[in-house]
Amino acid sequence: MCEGDLKGLPSIHKRRFGYILRENERVLKARDALREGDIEELGRILVEAHGDIAKNYHVSCGELDYIVRKALEFGAYGARLTGTGFGGASVIIADEGTASDVARELLRAYSRAFKWKARYFLVKASEGVKAEMV
């Protein structure tokens, strides 16, 4: 299926189904970027995904858009909302050596701009769960 197949649908459905098709393509591109160790490309994909879901699914909000914008200003490679949106959470990709600084600066800026209390968690990528026969 491609976006051309959505021609006869109402506008809202075209936007939302189009987002799903584009997001599926981004998932494959993100997988490839991770396999190649191309963190800059992964960051671009995340930012593109955030803009697309904000525009076409309307599940972002001013606070999340601010976080994505500011994270990039403070040196992150990319950011996007995660979960169901509507102000819940974002994922931000930054170098291990600068992640703490990005998070602190972002929290400081966010706290000045919005009344909501925010917090952050620094996490480190791993190889994931593995099953072993013992």
Image (cartoon, rainbow, N blue to C red):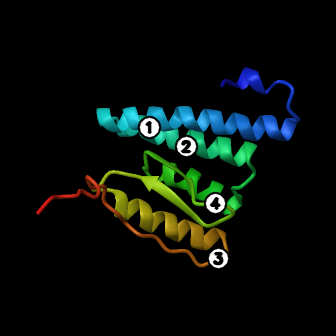
- Say which quadrant the C terminus sits in: bottom left
Task: Using the numbered discs, state the Cα–Cα distance from disc 2 to disc 4 in whole angstroms.
Answer: 16 Å
The quadrant holding residue 90 is bottom right
Q: CA distance from mark 3 to mark 2?
A: 23 Å
Residue picked out by circle 1: 30
Where does residue 130 sit, x and y in percent of width and height? Answer: 24, 56
- Residue at image point 67% right, 77% down: 115
Q: Earlier in the sequence, mark 1 or mark 2?
A: 1
Amino acid of disc 1: Ala
Q: Looking at the image, is mark 3 or mark 1 nearer the viewer?
A: 1
Q: Earlier in the sequence, mark 3 or mark 1?
A: 1
Going from N to C along the chain, the mark reached first, 3 or 4, is 4
The amino acid at mark 2 is Val
**Tag 3 near tag 1, CB within 8 Å:** no
Disc with the residue nearer the chain's start (4 vs 1):
1
Q: Which residue is mark 4?
A: 84
Q: Which mark is residue 15?
A: none
Q: Considering depth in this image, is 8 or 115 the residue closer to the camera?
A: 8
> Pointer 3: what residue?
116
Q: Position of residue 45 (x, y in %)?
A: 50, 38
